[in-house]
Amino acid sequence: MVWRWASLPHRAVTAVVVAAGLMLAIPATAEDFNIPSEEDLERIGVASEPAGMALKCGLDWEPYYLAFMARERRKPWTQEQLAFIGALFGFYQASYAEELPDDFCSDERVSEIEALMVELRAEWSR
């Protein structure tokens, strides 16, 4: 999946994230809202991929997401930034799931996804 970040000249929108042909606009509601860095946006996108695979395969992805957000809460983000990160994760997750082929969820792949999510949850809790 390729993520793009684009600033818009419109006063009501600070920026827009484009993934899988979908757009997530960030409203310009607070002057002090600092959009996460490009590096953070990429990291959030990569972290959302296993959740997207789990979504596609009907697996329980919520504990994985909650572990990711718990890690983000330990960082110096504002509440607005955390809300944005959570929304962006979900946006990327759904976009990624939509891109996967219908025959993606073999038994072997499901086992790999479950193992990956357990491994990353353990890593994030350290």
Image (cartoon, grey):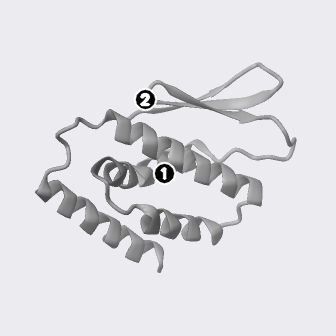
Residue positioned 33% across, 72% down in the render:
118
| Above/below status of 7 relative to 37 | above
The image quarter in which residue 8 lies: top right
| Above/below status of 22 relative to 80 | above
Q: Local crowd at mark 2 within 10 Å, few (<14), some, or many (≥20)?
A: some
| Above/below status of 97 relative to 50 | above
Residue 60: where, in percent of width, then height?
37, 63
Residue positioned 48% across, 51% down in the render:
43
| Above/below status of 54 relative to 2 | below
> Dots 2 and 1: beta carbons under 8 Å?
no
| Mark 2, residue position | 20
* In front of the other: 102 or 79: 102
Residue that lies at the very extreme toward the bottom in this rendered image: 126
Left or right? Give the position of 10 relative to 118.
Answer: right
Residue positioned 31% across, 54% down in the render:
58
Q: Local crowd at mark 1 within 10 Å, few (<14), some, or many (≥20)?
A: few
Sequence-earlier tag: 2 or 1? 2
Labelled disc at residue 43: 1
Residue 40: where, in percent of width, then height?
56, 50
The amino acid on which the numbered mark 2 sits, given as a three-letter code, is: Ala
Residue 70 visible from this viewpoint = yes
